[in-house]
Amino acid sequence: MLRLPATLMGASSSSSSVTSLRPLRALRPLRSLSSTPHTSSDKSWQASGSEIQEATRKAMIHDLTSESLTSIQETVPWFLSTLPPAYFRQTTAGIRTSHLKAITALRGVDMGLSLDLNGVAEDGRRVVTFIRPGDEKGMLLSQIRSLPKYDVPLTRVGIYTASDASMALNVFTYGSPLTDGDAQDDDQPDSTNVITDLAREVFEGERSFPGVEREACEPGAVEEYIGRCSPAYLNNSVSRRFLKQMSLYRAVAGTEGVAVEVEEFDANEYKDVGSGSTPLGKMWWVDSAIANSLPQYALEYFARVMKVNDLNIVRCHLDQVDDGENGEVTQLRMLVEPAKGGNGSDFDWKRLQRNLKRQKWIDPATADLLDKHPHLGIRRSEIITAFSSLLHPIMSPSNPVAYSKANIFASVTSKASIDRVAEIASFFIEKFDPRTGRMSESDQQSRAAELVKSIDASVVDRASNELLKKCVEVVSKTLRTNLFLEDRYALSLRLDPSLMHDFDDREHPYGVFFSHGRRFNGYHVRFRDISRGGMRIVTPGTGEQLALESGRHYDECYGLSFAQQMKNKDIPEGGSKCVCLVDTVGMSKENKNFVMRKSVKAFSDSLLDLIVETPETAEGALDYFGKPEVLYLGPDEQVLPEDINWIVQRAAKRGYRNPSAFMSSKPKAGINHKEFGVTSEGVNVFLDVALREVMNIDPTKDEFTVKLTGGPDGDVAGNEINILFREYGDNVKVVGMCDHTGSLEDPDGIDREELLRLFRESLPLGDFDTSKLNPKGKLHTVDTEEGVNMRNSMHNRVKADAFIPAGGRPNTVDISNYKQFLDADGKPSSPLIVEGANLFVTAEARQRLFEEAGVIVVKDSSANKAGVICSSYEICAAMLLSEEEFLENKEAIVADVLKKLRGFARVEAELLFKEYRNYPGALPHFSALISDTINTATDAIREEVDKLSPEERSKLLGLVKNHLPKKMAEMAFDRLETNVPPQYLVAAIASSLASKIVYSEGVNFVKSQPPENLSKIALRFIEAEVEVASLEKSLGGAQGMDSADKDKAIDLIRRGGVRSLLDVF
């Protein structure tokens, strides 16, 4: 095969063609192998003498000219008669000329019709042409995979086959479409008028066509759609097919959907295919509209499906249509015919449509597996790749090498295992096939036992054997899946949590969801039925880091969820977390962002598949769990406002109850954490109390120093420096910060106004004005190796009174490196750590730092809990208020929320240090103890409240009223029982009462109670509080008593009155 770039094809700036061929130069034969050297003037190939040389030259020119003319005379008629009319209509004269030159040259030298042309069209667009002999199966797919990766998208494709099957000529065009017409000839009628005339006839009922909606042809709608199309697309479209594609566009516009229609080809209606006397076999048009997809990949997906299904692509055209903020819709139309020997009459076209819809969302590993083992089909291939990804974090702890992600996939798809894993996938399909209904427990056990027996009999490799058996367990412990939902974006499983805990004795979460999609895997872990927590996106930079993150994917999600459970003690929701691991290795910034946004959509929508209650899910998703489930999400790392809006809108479209509550921090009808600094407000309260308690520093009077990880453009770090300067002014010096751009260090304090400028403008440290540095100040940027090292070690090196991790990856400080936080004398670089970021320091490292250096660590589940409380209030607002009500009163609501957040932080901080002063142990121990005590009390109280009658429960709603921000309670307290799900109200009552008891009476008061008595004592606590309040009021109004004695008596009653009334000490 010959590859010729445009420069070698003789393209010139004055030429109107994409490429042009220079006349072939006569080839010089090898010199004779004599020992006599030749000089540069030697011409041994021709006779000597100027006349003879001239005669020889003329003869050769004549011969070549005659041969070229003969070749041209033979090629041109063949070219005109065998290529389809569509080719001549849809390509420019210049492009056709370049193709004809190349084909003529190849035919003239009997090289065979195999050539690649890369050039630039007269309008500046890049054009790649493949010329190949015949139209063998899979040829288009291989060409697509070999296409160059330009920095502009693929915008048009034309696939043409000669009628004598001697040649395929495929044209791929990159770049923006023309705005002033394309290949249309001057004598052709205006295509817009032809289309609108036909649309009018359809709308008025004069004509009708399959797949063309009458409503889509309404006057105005057609013109609006035409305005979104390129002139090239308009000029090159058959009007009836254009209207059909318009209907497909309407079906997917503004979504992430794929619409596919199949129609048998009518040779009488379409004159564009074939020519001459060659008879045509049965063929089918496959028309598709693919929303918001990279066109080159969409084309590859569809070509792959055609290859797997033994369908030859006779013609193919690709165009893009503008879809506003949603990107573009790829219009792809293929004319296909069954491979030799088939007539298509018994082909399952419905199945083909389903498979084509899935192609946009399947992972490349699934596609590769399907290529290698076509008999598996898409569904089983996807199950196998999903199971392989799921197994990695389960199995790798026991042997990270043997059970690496690559080894797992290789093992389960090896020659020895492929039949067994296919049977396991079939077991999964049968268990959840809605056509056959639920499989009994006994049938499941029997089938699982048969598979295990078959594995033991046929798979001798130990690792493969164990992996396959684990796959069987995955099937048994999957309780719900979206496998049979037709328009799903990913494959999601609701798992029995015990599946994930073979090698540890950690507390099992309440629920685990796993989602596997194109270039991503995601976990959602929650510790209570009603739970909330953020969704974070993880995008490792290298393949090695991706493999490492995959192995600890579940553990990270579990750890974050457990930390969330600890910090959610003050709200109705338990702890949960989503972690979506996305493979963007080697991608450009633009493509990385594109894949991330796609992954967020696919992950969240696949979760909705398993929790919305609609006729579609009731019919298509068999349920072995037996209970409805409610999830509440929030934004975390790399989740953007556009993601939040899409998720809420999608939840509404999917029929989720209270869709606004599904995702917090909505840009308008939410409380943006970064804008209002909600997490940092709580962090700063803990810092304030800790400085006073540990360092004997009054930050409002005394100077102190702080270092932070995270940049001024970050949520927690940026807002924390703003709050520090707001509350303490010149008393505080920020001596160190680091973020993704570098490290900024200054022992005399980083310039306050410059830091605040970066904060206000959402700029990273790399944008710091170095002219504002003090003499000892230094900015290290990550564009040098030294800068990277300084950034990565800032948190260990820089000395400060307090260190606030407010950004960075989990487990940055662990048991292997905690000593780096200490200097040569064993003294810590900071004696106080207040964890604004989750899991920055591991539990083991915290303990060692405390034992060896006396470092006081305020644990994340306490320090940064304000963010989750704020998100919980957003959920309440979404359930109780309309969007208009919220927006009208947002300022007052936010002010009340911030006041509540500071209050929750202060009561815990004071109890935390009180417990630390009175009992032995490190501070994180007491932080965990407080969380555990409140959660234990909440669970006990919830069980008791569940038993109450609705009337008895209503009497406890005052607890929820006191929990709500003041303005929200004033506006909507009377809506609680009508707007809020009963199980949420029960959780709200229980959590409000539990936190109230623990914060007022202490940990030991609750811990000392037998579990069976705790809930009863808690309900009596409310009555005792009322009685104590009444007694305080009476004492306050008593006459004849010394005021000092009166105050002392009231204080004593307040401290011990409730316990005395409960008779609990």
Image (cartoon, helix red, strand yellow):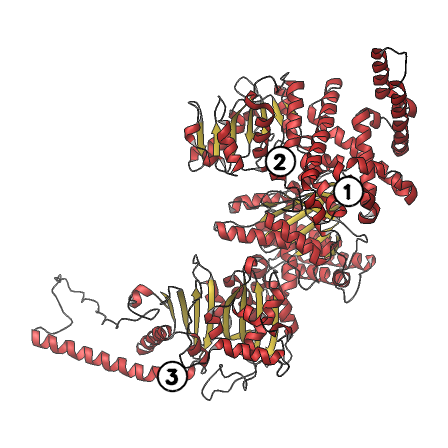
Which circle, 2 or 3, is nearer the viewer?
Answer: 2
Which circle, 1 or 2, is nearer the viewer?
Answer: 1
Is residue 230 something one can see in this rendering? yes
Q: Which label's residue is closer to the chain start, 3 or 1?
A: 3
Which residue is label 3 attached to? 78
| Spatial CA span between label 2 and label 3 | 73 Å
Which residue is label 2 attached to? 677
Residue plotted at (70% across, 51% down): 470
Instruction: Please report contact status of discs 3 and 1: CB closer than 8 Å, yes or no.
Output: no
Residue plotted at (14% across, 69% down): 44
| Spatial CA span between label 1 and label 2 | 25 Å
Q: Secondary structure at mark 3?
A: helix
Is residue 475 something one can see in this rendering? no
Instruction: Please report contact status of discs 2 and 3: CB closer than 8 Å, yes or no.
Output: no
Q: Nearer the viewer, residue 313 or 534?
A: 534
Residue 971 placement (x, y as % from top left): 77, 42
Split into 4 quadrants, where in the image is the C terminus? top right
The amino acid sitting under disc 1 is Met
Label 3 crowd (10 A; few <14 / some 14-19 / many >=20): few
Q: Which label's residue is closer to the chain start, 2 or 3?
A: 3
The amino acid sitting under disc 3 is Trp
Which residue is label 1 attached to? 971
Q: Secondary structure at mark 2?
A: loop
Side of 832 relative to 952 (left or right)? left
